Image (cartoon, rainbow, N blue to C red):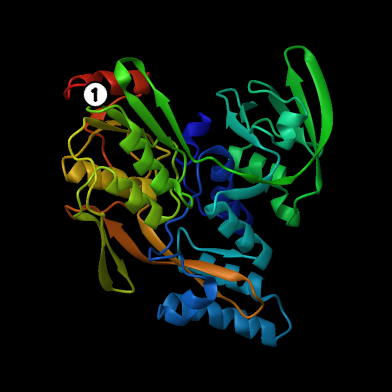
Amino acid sequence: MSGRDLFCQPRRLRRGAALTLVFASVLVAGAATGSLPGPERKSASDAARSSTSLHHEQVAAAAAEAMADGKSPMEAAERAVSRSGDRWGAVYSPGEYEEFEKALDGRYTGVGLWARRERDGRIEVSKVGEGSPAASAGIRAGDRLRSVDGEKVDGLPVTEVVSLLRGDATDAAAGTQVRLGLERGTRAWSLTLRRATLSTHSVTVDRLAGAVTVIRVDSFTKGSGDTVRSAVREAPDGAGIILDLRGNSGGLVTEAVTAASAFLDGGLVATYDVDGDQRALHAEPGGDTTRPLVALVDGGTMSAAELVTGALQDRGRAVVVGSRTFGKGSVQMPSRLPDGSVAELTVGHYRTPSGREVDGHGIKPDLKVEERALERAGTVLSGLGPT
């Protein structure tokens, strides 16, 4: 399994693993969340006041009862979430939730390593962030990561490796140390790095032969939607675009809608329900509706990225190429618990403009492609019109 297929095998997650799923994608692919859309992402306190979900009330009651008995409210909330069967429910400490929100703003605490798991279980560095502690220490893409703070990482899921790098178990802050064991060819060495608060660049733009523009969106963090719109405006006149959403595990729904607006002239992007209340998301008018467009997806395309894919496909705006997407179409809402921790619980589900359910189904591509996907996407694009 490659790092790009990181989210193809969901499982019931304890709190630390759920947090890792969120933050691993910041380091590997993109921030994983299907948070409630609105003009701004609601704070935990605002959401707690507005939510009438019985699920939230039950979790809050369990936490309050535990606190009154001198027990851990957070642990009681975790047990309540686990019993509820909420696949995407999670409970965060105040510090963890603060880091979560930083990640959605395009920031995270770490050392600047992107990682992937090879078929033999080895963990390989796939990318090193420019100006990061890892870059300053001379770590390169292709180096093999053998251990983190003395714990061997061969065979571990990438999510757990990233959790170790970030220090999730200890709520490690910027400035804390982490010791890495590395290999490059026949050379083996260890070094100690200090974690730092880093910024992610979730959108990259490249030009291919024939003036084709490739817009890769790793996650929908703050500002990414406007970056996509700018990239479309700056693309050569009439030239085709490949919107690469492979490995994009979601992010802020408002940013995803803005990105979809780059290719649509208003109209429906998705519908969703919150505690039974039906709502809709609409694109902004004025997008480019004429240039050829291919959306490239895979099993790591999830949540908000699936909303963009579904909207472009349903409205006939793009040819979707790749493999079936992950299938996370749920809406989560946060609520503050008595001890300051935060429970983020599922309150509804998204549907595409034609009414297709995303959760548990994913988006089926128009053309299934497993290998040389970018090359195949370019071939499809060339058949759609001038590039």
According to the picture, the residue beneath numbered tag 1 turns out to be 381
Can you see residue 303? no
Circle 1 SS class = helix
Residue occupying the point 18% across, 21% down: 386
Q: x and y percent of residue 362 in the render?
A: 31, 45
Q: Residue 71: tell me if it is visible.
A: yes
Which quarter of the picture shows residue 333? bottom left
Q: Nearer the viewer, residue 317 or 190?
A: 317
Q: What residue is rendered at 65% in x and 45% in y? A: 198
Figure quadrant of residue 99: bottom right
Q: Residue at x 53, y 77 (%)?
A: 45
Q: Quadrant of the C terminus?
A: top left
Q: Is residue 183 left or right of residue 38?
A: right
- Of residue 24 and residue 10, the one placed in the foreground of this image is 24
Residue farthest to the bottom, as pictured: 68
Q: In the picture shown, does residue 246 fall above or below 81?
A: above
**198 to the left or right of 321:** right
Q: Position of residue 253 (x, y in %)?
A: 39, 56
Residue 69 image offset from top left, x and y in percent: 70, 86
In the image, residue 314 above or below residue 372: below
Q: Residue furthest top?
A: 186
x, y percent for residue 74: 64, 71
- Label 1 crowd bin: few (<14), some (14–19), many (20+), radius 10 Å: many
Q: Going by the image, does 112 lie left or right of 91?
A: right
Quadrant of residue 228 in the image?
A: top left
Determine whether 308 is above or below 62 in the image. above
